[in-house]
Image (cartoon, rainbow, N blue to C red):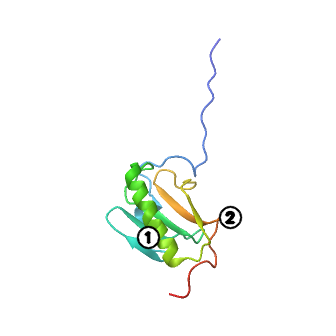
Amino acid sequence: MVARTRQATTSPKSALQSMNEPCELCEAARLTEWFYEDETCWIAECEQCYVPMVVWKQHDPAPPAALRDTMMELLGVVVRESYCFDGFYVDDNMRSIPAHYHAHARPRGGFFGHGLRRTDL
């Protein structure tokens, strides 16, 4: 009797990308407003969900904890300065680009940020 093994399958969106494939986050195209950038990360409005998103500049899904904490602090500053969220939570479930660390700040009780940008600046 031959043991049958089931071939693993995955959605193309959740498959890890190799560095031979293009990465939108590595490309860092300025398609929306950018709020912050340094040698470690950048923060811009996500073009899909209209909330601020922090992106680690290294193509890796797992930054060290201390670096992640720093990026979360920077993301919080952008939320408070540029959005009218009545509280927010950090969503770092990397749904469509799982091989490159990024996290979204989402409005409490919501997912999208349509109409929540501050206009009094």
Where is residue 11? Give x, y as percent: 61, 47
Furthest residue in direction front, as rendered: 87
Looking at the rendered structure, the kind of residue marked 1 is: Ala
Give percent across and percent down for residue 81. 49, 77
- Residues tagged 2 and 1 counted as in contact (Cβ below 8 A): no
The image shows residue 107 at horizontal and vertical percentages of: 62, 68
Q: Which residue is mark 2?
A: 109
Question: Circle 1 sits on which residue?
Answer: 29
Tell me which residue sits at (67%, 65%) in the image. Answer: 110
Percent x, y of residue 55: 44, 62
- Decide which of 98, 13 is in the foreground and name it: 98
Q: Amino acid at mark 2?
A: Gly
Residue at image x 58%, y 49%? 12
Badge 2 element: loop
State the SS at label 1. loop
Q: Does residue 55 sit above or below 7 in this rendering?
A: below
User: Relative to 63, is 45 above or below?
Assistant: below
The CA distance from mark 2 to mark 1 is: 29 Å
Q: Residue furthest right?
A: 109
